Image (cartoon, helix red, strand yellow):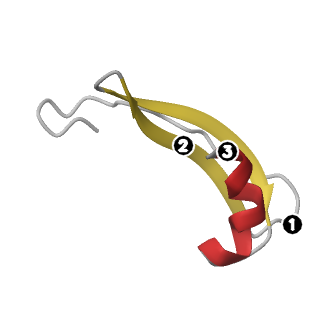
Amino acid sequence: MNGSNNKEIARYNLSAQGSHTAQIMAKVYRHNGEWKMHAIGENGYGRTVADLLTGIIPHL
């Protein structure tokens, strides 16, 4: 949500898919002074960032 006008900036819809315990949802970054969001949607297994690093690193 944009704090100044309460408008939605980005949305990511989840759907049930299997027995995974985590989802790498999106990458948020600045490009040419603007905030961008890139949806990833990759399922993972783990409960901490450390558990998911091998799945996260390719998206950095």
**Pointer 3 residue:** 59
- The disc placed on residue 27 is 2
Looking at the picture, how far across and down is residue 18, in whole percent?
Answer: 88, 59
| Callouts 2 and 3 close, C-beta under 8 Å | yes
- The disc placed on residue 32 is none
Looking at the picture, how far across and down is residue 13, in whole percent?
Answer: 60, 39
| Callouts 3 and 1 close, C-beta under 8 Å | no
Residues 21 and 56: in front is: 56
To which quarter of the image does residue 36 belong? top left
- The disc placed on residue 19 is 1
Quadrant (top left/top right/bottom left/bottom right) for the N terminus: top left
Instruction: Kindly identify the amino acid type of the residue bearing the numbered disc 2.
Output: Lys
What secondary structure is marked by label 1? loop
- For the view shown, which residue lies furthest in the right direction? 18
Q: Earlier in the sequence, mark 1 or mark 2?
A: 1
Looking at the picture, how far across and down is residue 21, in whole percent?
Answer: 75, 70
Q: Residue at x 14, y 29 (%)?
A: 5
| Callouts 1 and 2 close, C-beta under 8 Å | no
Q: Earlier in the sequence, mark 2 or mark 3?
A: 2
- On the picture, is 46 further left or further right than 30? right
Q: Nearer the viewer, mark 3 or mark 1?
A: 3
Residues 37 and 31: in front is: 31
Instruction: Kindly identify the amino acid type of the residue bearing the numbered disc 3.
Output: His
Q: Nearer the viewer, mark 2 or mark 3?
A: 3
Q: Is residue 30 above or below residue 56?
A: above
Instruction: Kindly identify the amino acid type of the residue bearing the numbered disc 1.
Output: Ser
Distance from the alpha carbon under mark 1 to that under mark 2: 23 Å
Distance from the alpha carbon under mark 3 to that under mark 1: 22 Å
Q: Is residue 60 visible?
A: yes
Q: Earlier in the sequence, mark 3 or mark 1?
A: 1
What secondary structure is marked by label 3? helix
